[in-house]
Amino acid sequence: MKNIDFWFSIGSTYTYLTVCRLKKVEEAVGVRVRWRPFSVRALMQEMNNAPFIGKPSKEKYMWRDLQRRAKRYGISISVPFSYPLEQFDLANRIAIVAERESWCEEYVQAAYHFWVNDGLPAGEESNVVESLKKTKQSYNRVMALANSDHTHSAYVDATAQARDLGIFGTPSFVVDDHELFWGDDRLEDAFEYWRDTAAIVGT
């Protein structure tokens, strides 16, 4: 059976829309995706790509575009929110731990909610405390794991896998380990491709 991987970094503004929409699309199509946290910041730095910072007109457009798209999907959002994240890597290392322990989706949803709607930047202590409370995880246990050498290595490895797949932004969706779709506006396209190719394989 073909699979869909959802490659993301907490810290991407548009990824918030996908995090809120993904479950509904999964249920409509009848497939579950794998959540794959990585460092898009590392890949963007390699490409010398800073999409919004230092570009006031583009950043202004981003905030308005997020408002429009969120309204279209019925998603709550309060813009502008703190951006970029200072504790970007910590937020995503926690996601690495959560993915390994099968509570990644719940953590990412909580981290984004408290960041986007309550003004608590993901990765900072206030957000982490509330997000882990929401997911019923021990703060001390998770922080120890998130700061461990093992998790650091897993984070670097995941980013290398994303690089090898040709991923350059988030959200990204990879079908069957090779077919790449980038952007929240390509979410449905990725699922449609999965459904069409799965039907072909099944015939």
Image (spheres, rainbow, N blue to C red):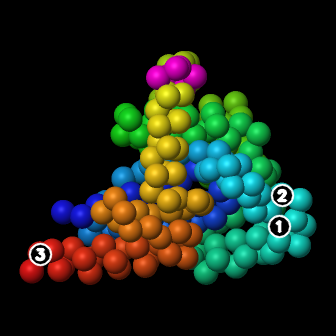
Amino acid type at circle 1 is Glu
Residue 110 in the image, given as x and y percentages of width and height: 56, 47
Amino acid type at circle 3 is Gly
Is there CB contact under 8 Å for labels 1 and 2?
yes
- Residue 147 sits inside the magenta stretch: yes
Marks 1 and 2 sit apart, C-alpha to C-alpha, by 7 Å
Q: Which residue is mark 2?
A: 53
Specify the segment rendered in magenta.
Answer: 145-150
Of 3 and 64, nearer the camera is: 3
Q: Which quadrant would the N terminus be assigned to in this image?
A: bottom left
Q: Which residue is mark 3?
A: 202
Q: Earlier in the sequence, mark 1 or mark 3?
A: 1
Q: Earlier in the sequence, mark 1 or mark 2?
A: 2
Amino acid type at circle 2 is Ile
Q: Which mark is residue 96?
A: none
Residue 57 in the image, given as x and y percentages of width and height: 88, 73
Marks 1 and 3 sit apart, C-alpha to C-alpha, by 45 Å
Marks 2 and 3 sit apart, C-alpha to C-alpha, by 46 Å
